[in-house]
Amino acid sequence: MRIGPVVLRRWAALSALLPMWGLALEEQPAVLEPELVVTASRSAREPGEVMAFISVITLEDIRRSLAEDLLELLRLQPGIDIVRTGGPGGQTSVFMRGTNSNHALVLIDGVRVASNNTGGYAWEQLPINQIDRIEIIRGPRASLYGSDAIGGIIRIFTRQSATPELRLTAGSFSSGEVEAAWGYETARSGLSIGGGYRDVGGFSAQNDGGFSYHPDDDGLRAANLSLNGAREFGEGTLAYRALATRNRTDFDQGRSRGEQYIASLAWSATARPGWNYQLQAGYVDDSLESDFGFFTTGFDSRRLDLQWQNQLELRAGQLGFGVDHVDDTGRAQGSYAGDRRNTGAYLLLEQPYRRSRLQLSGRFDRNSEFGIEFTYQAALALDVGAQGKLMGLYGTAFRAPNLNELLSPGFDGLFAGNPDLQPETARSLELLYQQPLGGGSRIVVSAWHTEVDGLIAFAGERFRAVNIDRAELRGVELDLQAARGPWRFKASVTWQESRDRSSRQALLRRPEEKAAFSVDRRLGGRAWLGADWFVSGPRDDIGGQRLPGYGIFSLRGGLDLTHRLALEIRLDNAFDRDYEPVIGFNSAGRAGFVSLRWEPGGEPR
């Protein structure tokens, strides 16, 4: 495996520009504050110590975006492509570094949440008002987390409000939304309750090129409720979190109803000085029922997720180890019912030496369906110049077949599952340069190459699930985050190539180029303005069709009416750009939203 010359040239050209950007930003200190991250090594670390390309979306980022859902934030991230069929509530795929949508591990409060029936996560179920923070780790992390972490990890932390909050929103497509939260904090405990309801009249999900076009408005009704809390007992902390969501989404010729319940209980403590551990039990219950008028489909899945993880501070370096167990059950209406279990154990060693750091990790997984899978990763970081870091990473990963692929009887024998399927496997090489600029500002350039073998596809005369396809993925990513005085700036550019290794055909719905730019400015002490510009290149779709590229420009702003009350306004797709996210499906045109946010218990703004 190698990173091609074109990829290396782009990486080198971008890296050469880093010193110039750094000098331009040194004139005035940045104000972005770095925070600890926990996903990359399963322990709390300073961002500059993490040996991976990471991005963190904070609560402040979420609030300033005024986004209606998480997907609007994710599409601005380098290396992530979003494909949604229709408007709010439409089925959504998230591709990380060109891999499939089920190659990204999704964690909510540390618990796996992808359906064990379909293998994917229903992103349309996740309400943005319940999110406190998001950590994005690019590249394989199966050596710590096991199955699914081929393209990367998206970890979501739910909110725990310390004061009352209320937000009301109205806008285009007959949209209305209410969000509320209440909470308190003491020196040793805290409790938070939050909820929301969203009603969107919507627009027609499909156009006249769709396979089931019907010219009506396809809307969304969604409700959510959460309970989060924590309490200290001696030297340990007991944390409990629960999130319930319920959605009803209309689509052409039908509608779907989805419910999801996620709960976790975690005990964190110190076994002895330098040895921290956590025990966590998580539970997920989700269901999805779709009514197409002439037939219905339904899926139910449940998961028990048990984890024990440890972090030891060595005389020079760190040691992490742990064990986890997942017990999955799933059912497809009128089709099949099944279960599977997976137990994994991991070990991570990190050792500094002069101006370098070496990290090695490995993991054994024992699965009830396919036996044992071993994954590993090696990373080396070298200090370069003033706080710069040059990193090289190589790792392996896998994805276990989901219950549909294993057990589904198909339709009259067509598109049936296969109990003899083996895991999809991957190996990835990455070259990464990171230059901090002070106060959380940074520039990152990454070049990567991934190969995936044994991809599951439906082939043969009966289109049965088999391990047959292979994919080759490569790319370069640039990410810049900076602040200067009242200005905040973010920019990212992605070049990628995702192809079937046999046919050399491009994988569907992944553009080769994309870019995103965001700028925010504080206006005095009471107002702020922001803008986002997202650009996507052409991409292939089904039937050999190629969709043209497009760009979307959005504006947003806020005004503090009082110390407790704020007015917020967002204008999406300001130039009313018309484009198809998927062949036969519509996208939202120009849309405006107005919100009032009330925080009676907050500090003066």
Image (spheres, rainbow, N blue to C red):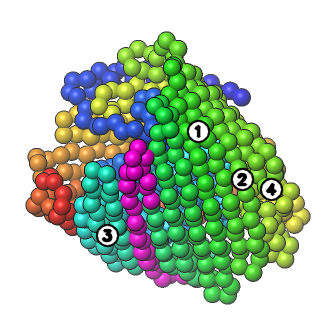
Q: Please give the residue where the numbered disc 4 appears in the rendered image.
A: 369
Give the distance between the C-alpha atoms of the residues marked 1 and 2, in whole angstroms: 22 Å
Q: Please give the residue where the numbered disc 2 appears in the rendered image.
A: 342
Q: Quadrant of residue 547?
A: bottom right
Q: Please give the residue where the numbered disc 3 appears in the rendered image.
A: 179
Q: Residue flagged by tag 1: what amino acid is it?
A: Gly
Q: Residue flagged by tag 3: what amino acid is it?
A: Glu
Element under label 1?
A: loop
Q: Position of residue 16 (x, y in %)?
A: 44, 20
Q: Judge whether 12 appears above or below 110 on screen.
A: above
Q: Position of residue 168 (x, y in %)?
A: 26, 71
First in residue order: circle 3 vs circle 2? 3
Nearer to the camera, 327 or 564: 327
Q: Position of residue 267 (x, y in %)?
A: 48, 51
First in residue order: circle 1 vs circle 2? 1
Which quarter of the figure is the N terminus placed in?
top right
Depth check, mark 3 against mark 2: the one in front is: 2
Q: Judge whether 362 appears above or below 530 on screen.
A: above
Does the rendering let one see residue 62?
Answer: no
Element under label 2?
A: strand
Marking on residue 139: 1
Give the distance between the C-alpha atoms of the residues marked 3 and 2, in whole angstroms: 38 Å
> Is residue 139 magenta-colored?
no
Element under label 3?
A: strand
Give the distance between the C-alpha atoms of the residues marked 4 and 1, in whole angstroms: 26 Å
- Bounds of the magenta segment: 214-240
Depth check, mark 3 against mark 4: the one in front is: 4
